[in-house]
Amino acid sequence: MAKRNSIRNTAFALGAVALAASLAGVAQAQTASDPQVTSQMAGLLAEKDARSATQSKIGSQLWYALQAGRVPSDDAQLTVYGSAVDAVKADANGMVRASVRGDFGDGSLASFIAAQGGQVLYVARNRQSALVSVPLSAVEAVAGSAAVGRIGLAAPASTNTGSLTSQGYISHKANQVVASGYDGTGVRIGVISDSVDYLQALIGTGDLPADAVVVPGQSGNTGSSEGTAMMEIVYDLAPGAKLFFATAFNGEQSFANNIRTLRDVYHCDIIVDDVSYFDEPVFQDGVVAQAVNDVVASGALYFSAAANSGNLTSGTSGTWEGDFTPGSASGGVLPAGYTLHQFKPGQDYNVLTAGSKWIGLHWSDAWGSSANDYDLFLLNAAGTAVLCASTDVQAGSGDSIEACYNSKGWPAGSRIVVGKKAGAEPRAIHIDTQRGRLAVATSGATFGHNGAASTVSTAAVYWNSARTGTRPFVGGAANPTETFSSDGPRKIFFRPDGTPITPGNYLFGTGGGRTLNKPDIAAADGVSTRTPGFLPFFGTSAAAPHAAAIAALVKSARPDYTNAQILNALTQTTLDIRAVGIDRDSGAGLVMAREAVNYALTH
């Protein structure tokens, strides 16, 4: 549901990283000129510097939520602490969900957490991280364990939202392939989303097969049942395929485990998801992307929604990425050497032009070992008050992320400010607002496993974009990508194990890292399904299962094909849309079932 260039736009990117670095007077006048806001920021930074070694292992949103119950009602930072309480969302028993990085190998850390009144919910396969439920009051005690490297707020996840058949069946010419005898028979497809609430009802109407399998215990909590709608699309286009489902909504560790389970236990040839976790690493493969790497290395194809965070071409980008450009230290009010990033000459803040629940800052340090300390502040529209601060400590074992979350949404007009501590090295940075928009924006919205090297990242095109009714896509200007579809490309600076791709070079402007041409392909959305709430079904969430089903048709025509050969058949026969050739909005273009199958049968 629409809720979540082959070559980078060089002129824009280089402009972003070559801004003047010494316009302090102008920048100072445009950001923290109000004495109250500079005093707030300075106070927050002073408190950060005073944290103990144990407290420095606690993510700032958890830490601020703890402070909300410890400070007087007239404390100057009460607004910041209150926003953290909203982000943390402790339940009636004071329990919060947190992500813990630590050694869970021998069970002793799990026992320690249990002794604090907590519970380990899901452990990553490498036993080095886990999703836990723990009393907010016990967070500092958990951080005090020598086995814990960090405890932070568990980030939210988002989907990138028969008797009834998807219009994509005709738009992609899948009907012609099925009529010729290739319907996905013999292919096993795993679907990962939020939940499958209406599965039995849709089996009863004939919109899903009776032999669909849900991984035991992994149907997902009652939700939107977006997984059911995805399965409908797959079944419409590839009615002979065997379908499997597992949820992604029990945390990133569980998500990664379910990816591997669908491949290793259920032997799925193709897996597709439509989920984004807001805190997945931007410049390196995280736990979910590493699971994708594993199943692709074993022979599976993995499709994912590119996400619904907008794109620069359509003027809907909520992304800024480029190199940190130092501006002002606000006249010495902030700590010595502390500098603010300039988003353009003379302006060291960016403005949300459409509201968002999530503001994330990432920079090009390896995950779990950042020694370059960056901070994120969100100010009100007038620049007179701090609404949120994210001030985690990065001192050699930190994650290269800061984030502000508010379940009610940060309002349009809010100012985003990025700060760098004295001594921290300049790095490539990425600002993500999920479905917000920015006044100063760039391309590069897709990230995490949605835009990873092993993933077939899928953009969305409205099935009736040419306004000709239910007919096959024709390509070109008649079938542009959706305005909300996330664009690329995706730059990465580190391998999955954290080793640098270009040692010593971690900037856009100096050609560091590796550029991935993402998204890879595009497919239909806005189609009809029988699942309640998904008539129509818009978003890259709908596009990804169309692409996965077409891959199944190719595999049913050529069972001997490898995953690389199937993907090649898809990309060699696409309809070009947007910019000529591979582009940052649609990748190779619209995948077409008949053309891909014909290519496979003749190559």
Image (spheres, rainbow, N blue to C red):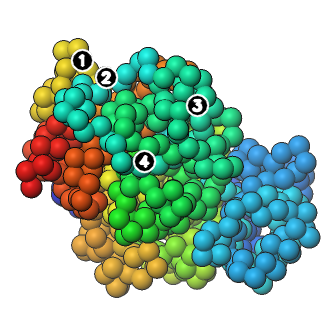
Depth check, mark 1 against mark 4: the one in front is 4
Name the amino acid, label 3: Leu
Is disc 2 in contact with disc 1, using a CB cutoff of under 8 Å?
Answer: yes
Residue 215 picture location, percent across and down: 60, 50
Q: Which residue is mark 4?
A: 189
Foreground pick, 50 / 165: 165
Q: Which residue is mark 1?
A: 470
Name the amino acid, label 4: Ile
Is disc 2 in contact with disc 3, using a CB cutoff of under 8 Å?
Answer: no
From the viewer's perspective, tell me whether residue 327 is left or right of residue 376.
Answer: left
From the viewer's perspective, tell me whether residue 93 is left or right of residue 198.
Answer: right
Marks 4/3: CA distance? Answer: 16 Å
Q: Residue at x 59, y 44 (%)?
A: 214
Instruction: Tell which circle, 4 or 2, labels the residue nearer the N-terminal end.
Output: 2
Answer above or below: position of 248 versus 478. below
Name the amino acid, label 1: Thr
Asked if residue 457 shows in the view, the reply is yes
Depth check, mark 1 against mark 3: the one in front is 3
Instruction: Tell which circle, 1 or 4, labels the residue nearer the N-terminal end.
Output: 4
From the viewer's perspective, tell me whether residue 592 is left or right of residue 155.
Answer: left
Q: Which residue is mark 3?
A: 199
Foreground pick, 562 / 523: 562
**On residue 167, which mark appears?**
2
Label 3, secondary structure: give it. helix
